[in-house]
Image (cartoon, rainbow, N blue to C red):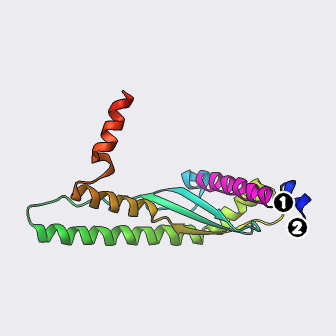
Amino acid sequence: MSRSQENRGGKAGATHRVQRVERQVRDVVGTLLLGGLSAELPALVSVSRVMMSSDLRTARVQVVAMSSIAAPVPTLDEEKNVADDKAHRKAIEAERKVIVKTLNESAYEVQAALAKILQMRFTPKVTFFYDEGFDNAMKVDGILRKLGSSPSASPALKSEDDGDQ
């Protein structure tokens, strides 16, 4: 690529286009997840992130779900609480696998909708993945809360918040 092409938006333009297509794919898939998908999902699912390849031929769609599985009620028996927690985590993991499997089986339907809306030469091949980022952040926050050093419990943050009022 020559300098004149770079100055006119060579790589920067391509990056901008990838980001624009990522937003469009996220919007279309999000709309389909709200009720336009023929497959039945066991929980409410939303798109957390879309990552397109630089040639715009593949899209990795990361999703998160509001689990339909209720958390166990804590009891005085610590062993029962641990067992219930393990069973709950297994059930949620199984639900996530079902969600991702169902979405990947319905990828052709998503790609058909993308083909109609995006007006691109090639329709991206869509693959769904579960986004573990939020869950990992919640685990870290829980550990920090147990240790008493959660960001929300930090004296420095509380004093900054008090100064804003």
User: Per the image, is 79 magenta?
Assistant: no
Q: How far apart are marks 1 and 2 (CA)?
A: 8 Å
Q: Is residue 50 left or right of residue 9?
A: left
| x, y percent for residue 157 | 34, 42
Quarter of the image with the N terminus is: bottom right
* Residue 10's disc number: 1
Mark 2 lies on residue:
1
The residue positioned 48% from the left and 62% from the top of the image is 41
Decide: few, some or many residues near mark 2? Use Cα within 10 Å; few <14, some 14-19, many ≥20. few
| x, y percent for residue 108 | 67, 68
Quarter of the image with the C terminus is: top left
Judging depth in this view, the residue of 165 and 33 nearest the camera is: 165
| x, y percent for residue 14 | 78, 60
Q: What element carries label 1?
A: helix
**Amino acid type of the residue that numbered disc 1 sits on in the rendered structure:** Gly
**Amino acid type of the residue that numbered disc 2 sits on in the rendered structure:** Met
Quarter residue 126 falls in? bottom right
User: Per the image, is 27 magenta?
Assistant: yes
Magenta-tinted stretch: 11-30
Q: Is residue 114 above or below residue 164?
A: below
Q: Main secondary structure of the magenta part?
A: helix
Judging depth in this view, the residue of 39 and 149 nearest the camera is: 149
Q: Do the residues labelled 1 and 2 touch (CB within 8 Å)?
A: yes
Decide: few, some or many residues near mark 1? Use Cα within 10 Å; few <14, some 14-19, many ≥20. some
Q: In this view, does 91 lie above or below 3?
A: below
Q: What element carries label 2?
A: loop
